[in-house]
Image (cartoon, rainbow, N blue to C red):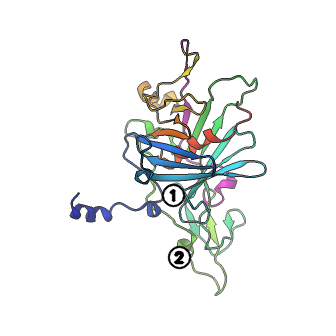
Amino acid sequence: VCRSWREVTKDVVKTLEECSRITFPISLKQCFVRRDRATSTYLLYLGLSPSLHGENDKLLLAARKIRRAARTSFVISLISDDFSHSSSTYVGKLKPNFLGTKFTIFDSQPPCDAAVLPNNKPSKRHSKQVSPRLPLGNYNVATVSYELTVLRNRGPRRMQCTMHSIPAVCIQEGGKAPTPTGMVHSLDEQVSTLSTSSKGKEPNIEFLSTSLSADLSGPISTSEAPLLLKNKAPRWHEQLQCWCLNFRGRVTVASVKNFQLVASVDPSLGVPAAEQEKVILQFGKIGKDIFTMDYRYPLSAFQAFAICLTSFDTKPACE
């Protein structure tokens, strides 16, 4: 590539740390995931398959499984050696319930329709007294639910994803998923624009219900119905005596973690049947601790990776 072209793209393309969100063209994106059992980390790379030389792999995201007394959680970062919530590389987290049947995906950045309002007066309902050095809070952008198995019958998992930050109309012809126009790195940027009533006092920031306290107040509320994703039902193969899905050669090892997600839309939206059968996200095993992850519009790399991480958590009520 010529030098002049590279200089032009520097003004257009931002680094991952600057843009925070990883986006690609609307076509299919093919990636793979490496699992490290010793450190409980999961690395997402861009590429068709693992290369022989690890230094050539393009790392997109990294996640670490944090074990606590009652439950576990996943912290997602831009790099593989820093999973601190206060780090600038922190992207989001994944939190399951006790039974492992419901997972909540939290994004460190607010959705494009969230708002932050400066206010010198504290509000009892929506305000939070926050240190200006802390990063922004967590925003509930998606929920992944697994069907509870009462009789503990062996079979494929059944899951459903509710994408709170993506409207269902985005998969219609001419539809468009919401795209953020900017990024808030930390509260330093907000505090710098506020004036205090008296010198030495820390300013208060009033957040809307979809802001900093989103992890306490529930999912992001939008005027449009959220996009619902459901797993594509596998078919029973009589000769092989197992459940099968057509992964088009991208999955080679049978595993309960393998799945394909398609859109579940209301008939009133008029989405063609062919569009509803299109696989938006697929995940499957190809070797020991190696998995493929293919996703397309309207999911982002972070959202797709977080959904796939739910397959790695223990689900005592679903298996």
What's the residue at 39%, 62% (across, down)? 14
What's the residue at 66%, 34% (across, down)? 146
Near mark 1 (Cα within 10 A), the count class, few <14, some 14-19 or many ≥20, is many
Across and down, in percent, residue 223 comes to 55, 46
Comparing 318 with 32, the one in front is 32
Q: What stretch is highlighted in magenta?
A: 210-239
User: Mark 2: which secondary structure?
Assistant: loop
Q: Does the magenta stretch include residue 1?
A: no
Confirm whether residue 297 shows in the render. no
Across and down, in percent, residue 201 comes to 67, 82
Mark 1 = which residue? 78
In the displayed structure, 49 sits above or below 208; it is: above
Mark 2 = which residue? 193
Across and down, in percent, residue 36 comes to 59, 48
What's the residue at 66%, 41% (across, down)? 313
Residue 189 relative to residue 198: left or right = left
